[in-house]
Amino acid sequence: MEHYQLIIAYDGTEYRGFQRQADSATIQGELETALRKIGWQGETIYAAGRTDTGVHASGQVISFTHDWQHSEKDLLAALNHFLPDGIAVQSVTSVGDEFHPRYDALSREYQYAITFSPVPLPQKERFMWRINEEWNWDAVNEIAMLLVGEHDFSQFGKPFKPGNCTTRKILVSKWTRVNPTDCVYTIEANAFLYHMVRRIVFVLCKIGEGRTCREEVQKALAGEKNTIPPGIAPACGLTLTKVRYNDNIKD
């Protein structure tokens, strides 16, 4: 019996998030269905994070044990054969029995993609948030850098269990212009609150539009309520891109 770590990519548009649900299509459900078609008899797979409905991934990490009698390359090919379009295994690695994709993670990286256009763009809108007009980029970049460090993010998300700590440490928070109309926000943290990334992106959008300011964000980071506009960015622009472990290798 081997313990395997897989890196998974998926288009989350048609799924009700990662976590298995009885009456809805989910990423976990599709993965476990594919595994059972190759003889897997486990009860559940484990994941680095539970992405929400409509959220994508290029670097989701899962693990499971399986009595597979062939190579890792063959396991990758077999799973991709049975997985539906929109979900694909990127790599398969045999790991130690102690490895847990969630609890061993040092940090997670997400990217949020935005395109600026006054008209719909069918080829982009499945994976990007379309915004009509350009922002004040100096203000947006200033606040993005302000988020780096350890802060109380209670005004930017909710803990998965009521009453849990809302302090998180942001390691990376930056915008990249991909071309004249498209940009990507990259954020990496030791952990995230529920809806935290989409909430941050929404607030940065309001900064760019001049609808909130640095002082109000600073108050929110100190835990003060009702200083920033309510709302979250759409799920379509968000992708889980990387999960980091010790040297990103588990033996």
Image: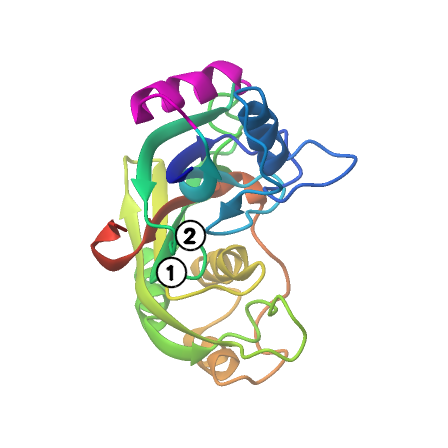
Q: Position of residue 71 (x, y in %)?
A: 31, 23
Label 2: state its secondary structure.
loop
In reply to whether residue 107 is colored magenta, the answer given is: no
Q: Quadrant of the N terminus?
A: top left
Do labels 1 and 2 touch, CB within 8 Å?
yes
In reply to whether residue 75 is colored magenta, the answer given is: yes
Rounded to the nearest whole Å, what is the CA distance between mark 1 and mark 2? 6 Å
Helix, strand or loop: magenta stretch? helix
Q: Position of residue 180 (x, y in %)?
A: 29, 36
Residue at image point 57% right, 44% down:
235
Does residue 36 appear left or right of residue 101 in this picture?
right
* Residue 132 in view in this figure: no
Label 1: state its secondary structure.
loop
Residue at image point 47% right, 14% down:
81
> Which amino acid type corresponds to the residue marked 1 in the rendered image?
Asp
Residue that label 1 marks: 104
Q: Position of residue 87 (x, y in %)?
A: 49, 26
* Residue 90 falls in image quadrant: top left
Q: How is the image coloured?
A: rainbow
Q: Return the mark for residue 73.
A: none
10 Å crowding of disc 2: few (<14), some (14-19), many (20+): many
Quick check: 171 above or below 136? below
Residues rendered magenta in the picture: 68-84
In the image, 208 versus 222, the foreground residue is: 222
Q: How many numbered marks, from 0 up?
A: 2
Residue that label 2 marks: 101
> Which amino acid type corresponds to the residue marked 2 in the rendered image?
Pro
Residue at image point 51% right, 62% down:
203
10 Å crowding of disc 1: few (<14), some (14-19), many (20+): some
* Residue 11 in view in this figure: yes
Quick check: 230 above or below 69? below
